[in-house]
Amino acid sequence: MDALMHAVLLGFLTFGVCSARKVSVPTGPLIRVEGQPVAIRCNVSEYEGPREQDFEWKMRRGTGRPSINVVSTFDSRYTDASLSSRVAAGDVAVARLGDSEVELRIGEARPSDGGVFSCHTPSTDSVIRGSYQADVELTVIPDTLVVSPTPVAAVTPEGGDITLSCTVTRRLLHPTFLSVTWSLRKASSSSSAPPELVLSLGPLGAVTTGPGYAQRYATGGLRLAPGRDGLFSVVLSRVTAAGDQGAYVCTGRQWTYEEGVARSVVERHGEMGQATVTPTGQSLNVTASSSAGGPVSLGATLGLLCTVAADNLALLALGVTWLRDGRHVIAAMDRNGVVLPAAAIAASNGSSGGGAEVGLERTGEGQYRLALRGVAARDSGAYTCRVRASVGGDSGRWYQAAERTSAPVVVKVAQIEPTFSLALSAVRDPQAVSHPLELVCHVTNITHLPPSGLLGVTWKHTPSPGTDVQSARTIGSLDHHGNLIHGPGDADRLDGGVMSLRRVEPDTFKLILLRTQEVDMGQYVCNVSAWLQDRQGGVAKLAEYLSAPLSVSWTPKRPSLGVVAVRLREASGGGATFEMKCTVDPQNLPGAGFSVLLQSQESIEGAVRTIMNLSPDNVLQYGGATDPQRRDSLMLSKTGPGEFTFRLAGVQLADRGFYWCNVHAWTKPAEEAGAGGLWTQATRAESNKVRIDFQENGPSFAVAIQSDRSSVFPWETAKMECALSVSGSAPKSDDVAYEVSWFFSRLRGGSAPALLAAVDRYGVVRGGVSPGNTSSDVSVERRDANTYLLRVHGTQDSDSGEYHCSATPWYLSASTGAWTQAQELTSPAVFLTVRFAVWESLKLPLLYGSMASLGVGIFSLVLGLVCAHCCCRNTLHTPRSRNKLMDLEMD
């Protein structure tokens, strides 16, 4: 008990310590500016009594001076007479912020308001505990903040700088800090809309930017400029009319730190004036001039000058483009001074442009010189200079401010076409197929070809003499740079190196065929053209000449093929393997390689299908008629120098039809006989057709039923077995499944049998009707792949009758690859008898009857004795003996 009392006492003491009343005010000292509002909060916690607490404010103006009452939340007469007028006017008031929090508010601080303010809370506690007042010192300093903005420049060209300067000062009587903020009211905004923040320099030097100026400040488009004696400046670079035009405002603030948090005590605003940004397009001017006074001779150099003038030219990034006839781009320089490549200019034109070599350079501020070296007739036209002026945006990116195009300068070029002669000869003349051919085209007597002129050649071939050259087949070309251009039919030979076109000297060209074919006989011509280099790196054609035709022929020895297909293994039924061999007999094909296409068709008139393809390099590919799932069953391989074997395992009905080999003979030049050379087709032939034809012979099924015994006693289990057998082309055990059903008929040859149970081919059992009364039950069991067992549990007399089973076989056909349903089979019937045993059926009734009779007899005997003793007694009076009466009388 003593321990319990000590614990209770300790709890009360602890609660008393932890729940002591506490009055809180700001830490102070508080510094406020004369004429500015003052707000001091006071709250109380851990108190007892009503939820809503009352407060009293007092102040003391100096050490040793008495305190005066300021204001109270519950006593309107609490205020001292010296402050009553201010309280009545609302300049001094107390505002309740909650049940336990109030705020002392002074509308306009006066120097006399400096002192120590005390917040008191009258006690509502049962025990005086804790603090009931808190003090904070308030200092009121004079308002010495001065904001003097410097007027902003009235007009600034687009892309220039706007400097925002503002002088903010105050007398440092107490530890206070200054901040400066610049704002903009855009010309597009309404007069009532608040200005947007541009930049703010915090009391400790922290910089804050407006939402639209963060990126600009990060990229240097907005920056602080150093100043002294209270001068603060901000520079806005790359100004635009849309983003920087409007009225600017400078705001200065004086701050103090209370409890580690900055607090603004006074602020001033200063209008800096309206800033206007003039667009670049108002002053941009572009002119073009030519260094030639008249027509320019072919191959000469022409200079064109583009002059750009603008008020803010030093601030602009200029993109200069020279155009001919207003649509063809001749040369271009972007705003970074990078000249566009000739290929990009040609792509923009959609053509090769002119014929001169082009140069573009910046020769001075606002001056761009276009040089055309080796001008051609195509360079004639009206030239204009288009200038796009860009200004750096506020986000650090450039944007196009204006665009101007100069008046056209007309250029005329006088042209004289060059002339030359051609000589075509054969260095090596083939005498048979596969021999090399080498032709030389030599250019002579060249006149009037400009120094920058170039020659190109085109080789053409006609299969027979007398054919029009204009309809000749183009073999290939070498352009003025020596680049090879394929003809429409010789790309493989040119890419493989079997055929080559070469420039052996500036005026000599060669056509070489390392290994000729029969189709190479005929007439050859060389077509030489003169070109002039254009300014984009392309060329312009000046002249074109055709050589005399040169005939090339020899006595042909035609290659031939003989292909024979032989059946190696016959497919006599579905699932069997078919195999055949194709033997190739080549003629006039030394060192030839063979590719084999194994093809088939269902009938002679049917569509041809490609099954497999074996290349001359023994690379095997499957055709579109091949089922991807049966690719492992197909084989096509080279089994000898001219022998190819095809094997098809597991044939199906869909594979019936005709099969043959389509053989192509390929040759390689002697110089490329090794691996990596290019094959050239020489001839082709097809073999005879071998047929796959067989009939579908499915397996044969039989069903039988047997019972372990023909008669059972009641409540015993009867078993009957349904056995299936398969013969003929018996499939694998996993490829056969059965649907088995059991039927029952009560009388021999009686009404329609009833379904007892069934098992589908997936092994799912479904029940039928009960064969007898509800006390019997049946179950089905699959003993092995071909045997199903029926059990009749708890037999009754009603279970006597005929039983038989029916089965529907399913097998996976080797011919079709699909599950096939066979004909339904029905077994013979077996008769089940449930025997009736006389003694077994009577012994229990006799035993029960004897026991009942004995019980009834004993009960009757006992009942008779009870009745005789209790209910059947003699109630008549028996007279006394006379002798006795006499004796009594005597007595």
Image (tube, rainbow, N blue to C red):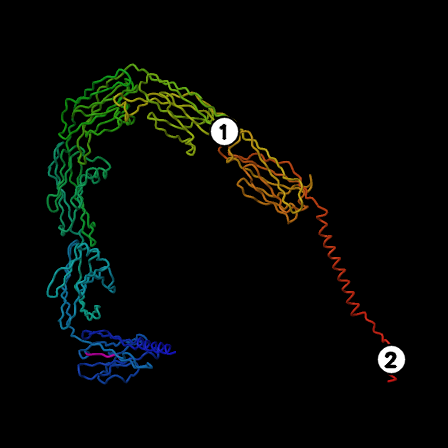
Where residue 261 sits: x, y (%)?
A: 22, 68
Observer-nearest of 42 and 268 = 42
Q: Cβ–Cβ below 8 Å for labels 1 and 2? A: no
Characterize the local packing of mark 2: few (<14), some (14-19) or many (20 or more) Cα atoms within 10 angstroms.
few
Q: Residue at x 78, y 67 (%)?
A: 867
- Magenta-colored span: 115-119
Circle 1 is placed at which residue position? 574
Q: Secondary structure at mark 2?
A: helix
Hey, what amino acid is under mark 2?
Lys
Q: Is residue 249 visible?
A: no
Q: Secondary structure at mark 1?
A: loop
Return the disc, 1 or 2, that comes first in the chain's sequence.
Answer: 1
The N terminus lies in quadrant: bottom left
Where residue 156 sits: x, y (%)?
A: 15, 56
Image disc number at residue 884? 2
The C terminus lies in quadrant: bottom right
Q: Is residue 452 above or below residue 762?
A: above
Hey, what amino acid is under mark 1?
Gly
Where residue 779 sits: x, y (%)?
A: 59, 44
What secondary structure is the stretch in magenta mostly built from?
Answer: strand
Image disc number at residue 633? none
Q: Is residue 444 left or right of 710 when viewed as pictured?
A: left
Observer-nearest of 207 and 129 = 129
Q: Tell which residue pokes out farthest to the top in this image.
A: 555
The quarter of the displayed image where residue 633 is located: top left
> In this figure, what is the number of numbered marks?
2
Q: Nearer the viewer, mark 1 or mark 2?
A: 2
Q: Is residue 13 above or below residue 519?
A: below
